[in-house]
């Protein structure tokens, strides 16, 4: 049985001029409200079977003014997204009509949903756990196929399962400790108990650590690898950018900046999402070195996880090239020797004394030579070739990472406690803390404010 809430509604399609817009209503009164504003002869929505869809019109019941032609889906609890009664009104006018339908729904008894409130109800009604709810948010925000896949895997409960198994192990250990304490007649019971706690703490800690090791890859998959394409004028940066964008179907996102809108572009290279930095800079001016200066370019570079440093191999290395080499020394970088269709004038041996030879790749944007190798190098650099693990569980969520780190600390306290001869019941507290912390990931032990704060990060209508 679902917990009782009021009935909420929101537009659940993304903002903008789409072909259809959907107004979603959820709660005990969803059908009642839909019925008030729905019209098709004498058809009554409340009498219709669950999981059916109905053509009709939305009208303002007070003025009888028609609002839009619609298709209305009826889904009765519990087999719904929120586990409550859900009605979805598919409107087909543009944004104006969707808004008018929503207004009509709201003036007939529903309350406007807060961002994430539908998903929050799914969580509170026990349909999904917290890490799955967070995955919903990730699916909505996913910028690349890989990120999407990762989120869907999490939604599927991979991470939750893993965490629940770890918690179960901790619980078993705590139970065993209790048993030992209850039978103190054995002489060596204290020693046994201490040994058990240390062993288990170390064992589960190791599993948490290996989960954390996936975090940096997870973060990349989630946010995209911040990538800067740099090089002096005319070496082929714009050309390279265009090739990447064209071949890999760029996803362009607009982010409201403080002074102007910055355009972020994403490309997926062999499943590695690249978030290209300062592409506007590459497009607008041909002289990035002069424009931002070496000092500032170094600063711009500080955000980059990956640098694609482009040289023109039909010319000898110039002093500017060498400055850029110096400026990118500390970065993961790939040295692209472009224009390989032209005669070679760049001294490869000299270059090899300055950079890791395996980071060098020859390309020609004109003939497309070397581009596959370039993509391979990008992928290798970050996943050592194992991106293909389809159902690997990656941790990518900052909240999860912080909790896992705290869990490790709790285990360390357990181990240290035993080693310094702390009484077992005190050590138990730290072990229980580890159990609690892991539970916060799945929401099995979680506080109200956290839930409120988490769900408020969602988009409206989800
Ligand atoms: P940027 O200033 O670094 O952005 O360089 P552009 O991408 O604007 O390229 C400068 C010039 O080099 C343009 O005329 C391109 O067509 C040309 N170019 C780019 N890549 C190649 C290449 O691989 N081979 C040859 N021959 N020309 C290229
Ligand atoms: Zn350019």
Image (cartoon, rainbow, N blue to C red):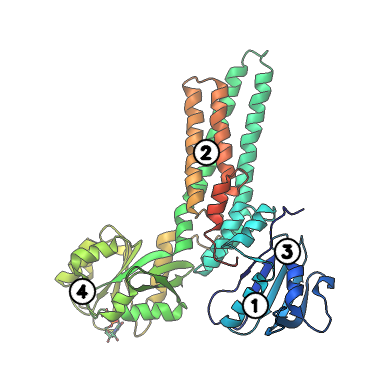
Disc on the earlier residue, 1 or 2: 1
- Which residue position holds label 4? 291
Foreground: disc 3 or disc 2:
3
Ligand 1: quadrant of the figure? bottom left
- Which residue position holds label 1? 101
The residue sitting at 82% across, 76% down in the picture is 44
Please say if the residues under marks 4 and 2 sit with CB atoms less than 8 Å apart: no
In the depicted structure, whether residue 358 falls above or below residue 310? above
In terms of secondary structure, where does tag 2 sit? helix
Q: Position of residue 334 (x, y in %)?
A: 32, 66
- Which residue position holds label 3? 80
Disc on the earlier residue, 3 or 2: 3
- Which residue position holds label 2? 205
Disc on the earlier residue, 3 or 1: 3
Disc on the earlier residue, 4 or 3: 3
Name the residue nearer the viewer: 372 or 288: 288
In terms of secondary structure, where does tag 4 sit? helix
Q: Could you tell whether 395 is left or right of 3 in the image?
A: left
């Amino acid at each position: 049985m679902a917990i009782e809430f009021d009935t909420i509604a929101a537009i659940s399609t993304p903002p903008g001029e789409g072909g259809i817009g959907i107004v979603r209503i959820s709660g005990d009164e969803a059908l009642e409200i839909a019925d008030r504003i729905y019209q098709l002869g004498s058809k009554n929505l409340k009498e219709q079977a669950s999981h059916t869809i109905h053509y009709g019109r939305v009208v303002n019941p007070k003025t009888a003014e028609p609002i839009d032609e619609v298709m209305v889906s009826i889904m009765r609890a519990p087999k719904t997204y929120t586990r409550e009664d859900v009605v979805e009104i598919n409107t087909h006018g543009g944004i104006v009509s969707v808004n008018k339908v929503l207004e009509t729904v709201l003036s007939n008894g529903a309350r406007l949903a807060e961002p994430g409130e539908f998903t929050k109800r799914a969580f509170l009604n026990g349909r999904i756990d917290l890490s799955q709810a967070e995955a919903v948010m990730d699916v909505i925000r996913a910028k690349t196929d890989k990120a999407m896949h990762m989120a869907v895997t999490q939604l599927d409960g991979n991470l939750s399962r893993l965490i629940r198994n770890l918690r179960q192990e901790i619980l078993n250990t705590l139970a065993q400790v209790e048993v030992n304490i209850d039978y103190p007649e054995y002489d060596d019971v204290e020693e046994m108990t201490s040994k058990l706690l240390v062993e288990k703490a170390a064992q589960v800690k190791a599993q948490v650590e290996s989960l954390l090791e996936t975090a940096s890859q997870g973060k990349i998959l989630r946010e995209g690898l911040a990538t800067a394409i740099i090089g002096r004028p005319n070496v082929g940066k714009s050309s390279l950018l265009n090739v990447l964008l064209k071949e890999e179907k760029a996803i362009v996102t607009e982010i409201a900046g403080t002074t102007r809108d910055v355009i972020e572009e994403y490309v997926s290279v062999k499943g590695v999402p690249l978030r290209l930095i300062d592409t506007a800079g590459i497009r607008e001016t041909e002289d990035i070195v002069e424009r931002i200066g070496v000092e500032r370019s170094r600063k711009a570079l500080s955000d980059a996880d990956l640098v694609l440093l482009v040289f023109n191999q039909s010319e000898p290395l110039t002093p500017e090239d060498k400055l850029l080499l110096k400026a990118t020394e500390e970065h993961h970088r790939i040295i692209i020797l472009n224009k390989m269709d032209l005669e070679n004038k760049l001294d490869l041996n000299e270059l090899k004394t300055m950079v890791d030879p395996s980071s060098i790749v020859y390309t020609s944007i004109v003939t497309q030579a070397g581009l596959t190798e370039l993509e391979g190098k990008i992928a290798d650099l970050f996943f050592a070739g194992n991106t293909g693990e389809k159902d690997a569980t990656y941790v990518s969520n900052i909240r999860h990472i912080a909790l896992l780190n705290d869990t490790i600390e709790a285990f360390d306290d357990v181990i240290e406690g035993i080693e310094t001869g702390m009484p077992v019941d005190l050590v138990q507290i730290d072990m229980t803390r580890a159990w609690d912390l892991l539970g916060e990931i799945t929401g099995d032990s979680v506080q109200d404010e956290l839930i409120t704060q988490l769900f408020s990060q969602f988009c409206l209508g989800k």
